[in-house]
Image: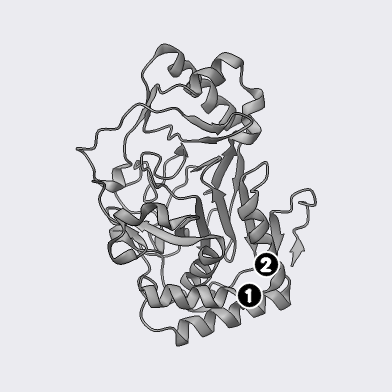
């Protein structure tokens, strides 16, 4: 596995060499053809966890390092993964599309998820599927979520939830034909030193309310005020959704404005190609998407998404039968 050209200073932008890529494909095909059940079944996840140990050592080492310390960008891009491109069907264009059947993409995502922690999902969102399609849907162009195609504002995934994911994985099966759609990421680790003391102080105060994303359909949920920053003052976690977080004081309003300005100024844009996997550290990095114009002809951008929990035990009370899907909040 080699560091990608042009990214010599970033150990978390890597390209599999041909040998390692072929090894991943071989392990993935074996999982697809031999594991019993479907990707959402515990037995299939168990098989994916076993298969993880058969992946190339260099790949496993990189992901172990990233799990321990996701670096200043709080993200990783891994290139050269198999996605079964020759057998890929047309891009789905229906609301709530998910991957329920075994596939190479699902195998790659769940093996990597098991290497980083455990896959997880939320029952109210896409029925709790462990592998979810991120595709544009007709009529939802302005939607602030994975089905939209307008500018998607910066956010941590499922900010409102006590057991939000630790990592968000996005695997590209098919690229945007026009090359406009791009994953945008920005890390609090890069932005924090650029913020004034009053702005930082405001972000640490419990003066922000974040509602659930529209995809959850939780219209009756009442969020409590919470800070945007928490944890270690020198390396804080961040919890914010710039389309759903409301500031409740004047200083908080200004702090959010400055934060968004710095995110926009220092964001990286990743126009993913087939076989490229972006992993976002949801604790320190926000993500969004550029605007693009879908064709709705079966050739549109198609990513698949899986969430990762590094400590699944913490959510045991919300997971029926100790499975991987969190149910409704109490």
The reply to whether dot 1 and dot 2 touch (C-beta < 8 Å) is yes
Residue 293 in percent (x, y) is at 44, 48
Q: Position of residue 210 (x, y in %)?
A: 35, 32
* Spatial separation of the CA atoms under disc 1 and disc 2: 7 Å
Q: Quadrant of residue 211?
A: top left
Number of disc labels: 2
Image height check: is 179 above or below 52? above
Establish if 229 lies above or below 102: above
Q: Residue at x 53, y 70 (%)?
A: 111
Specify few, some or many for label 1: CA neighbours under 10 Å numbering under 14, 14-19, or 20 or more.
Answer: many
Of all residues shown, which one is farthest toward the bottom? 34
**Residue wearing tag 2:** 59
Q: Secondary structure at mark 1?
A: loop
- Mark 2, secondary structure of its residue: helix
Q: Residue at x 40, y 52 (%)?
A: 314
Question: Residue at left 37%, top 53%?
Answer: 315
Residue 325 x/y as whole percent? 33, 60
Query: Residue 186, can we see it?
Result: yes
Is 88 placed left or right of 192 in the picture? Answer: left
Does 107 sit left or right of 131 as displayed? right
Farthest left residue in view:
220
Q: Position of residue 80 (x, y in %)?
A: 65, 68
Residue 282 higher or lower than 190, as above or below: below
Is residue 94 visible from the viewing direction of this image?
no
Please name the residue that numbered disc 1 is placed on. Answer: 55
Snapshot colouring: one colour
For label 2, count other residues whose C-alpha is less than 10 Å away and answer few (under 14), some (14-19) or many (20+).
some
Residue under the point 51% across and 32% down: 230
Residue 175 circle label: none
Specify the quadrant of the image occupied by residue 55: bottom right
Specify whether 20 is left or right of 87: right
């Amino acid at each position: 596995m080699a560091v990608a050209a042009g990214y010599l200073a970033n150990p978390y932008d890597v390209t599999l060499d041909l040998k390692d890529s072929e090894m991943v494909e071989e392990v993935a095909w074996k999982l697809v053809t031999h594991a019993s059940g479907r990707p959402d079944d515990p037995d299939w996840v168990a098989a994916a966890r076993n298969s993880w140990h058969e992946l190339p050592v260099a790949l496993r080492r990189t992901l172990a390092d990233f799990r321990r310390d996701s670096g200043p960008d709080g993200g990783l891009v891994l290139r050269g993964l198999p996605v079964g491109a020759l057998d890929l069907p047309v891009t789905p264009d229906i609301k709530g599309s998910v991957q329920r059947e075994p596939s190479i993409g699902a195998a790659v995502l769940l093996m990597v998820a098991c290497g980083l922690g455990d896959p997880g999902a939320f029952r109210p969102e896409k029925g709790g599927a462990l592998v979810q399609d991120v595709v544009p849907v007709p009529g939802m162009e302005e939607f602030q979520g994975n089905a939209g195609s307008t500018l998607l504002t910066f956010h941590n995934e499922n900010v409102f939830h006590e057991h939000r994911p630790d990592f968000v994985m996005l695997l590209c099966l098919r690229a945007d034909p026009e090359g406009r759609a791009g994953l945008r990421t920005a890390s609090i680790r890069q932005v924090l030193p650029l913020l004034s003391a009053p702005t930082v102080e405001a972000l640490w105060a419990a003066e922000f309310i974040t509602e659930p994303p529209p995809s959850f359909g939780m219209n009756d949920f009442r969020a409590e005020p919470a800070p945007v920053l928490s944890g270690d003052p020198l390396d804080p976690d961040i919890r914010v959704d710039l389309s759903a977080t409301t500031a409740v004081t004047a200083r908080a309003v200004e702090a959010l404005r400055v934060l968004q300005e710095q995110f926009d100024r220092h964001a990286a844009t990743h126009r993913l190609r087939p076989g490229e996997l972006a992993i976002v550290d949801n604790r320190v990095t926000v993500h969004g998407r550029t605007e693009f114009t879908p064709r709705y002809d079966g050739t549109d951008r198609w990513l698949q998404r899986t969430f990762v929990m590094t400590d699944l035990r913490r959510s045991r009370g919300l997971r029926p039968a100790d499975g991987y899907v969190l149910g409704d909040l109490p």
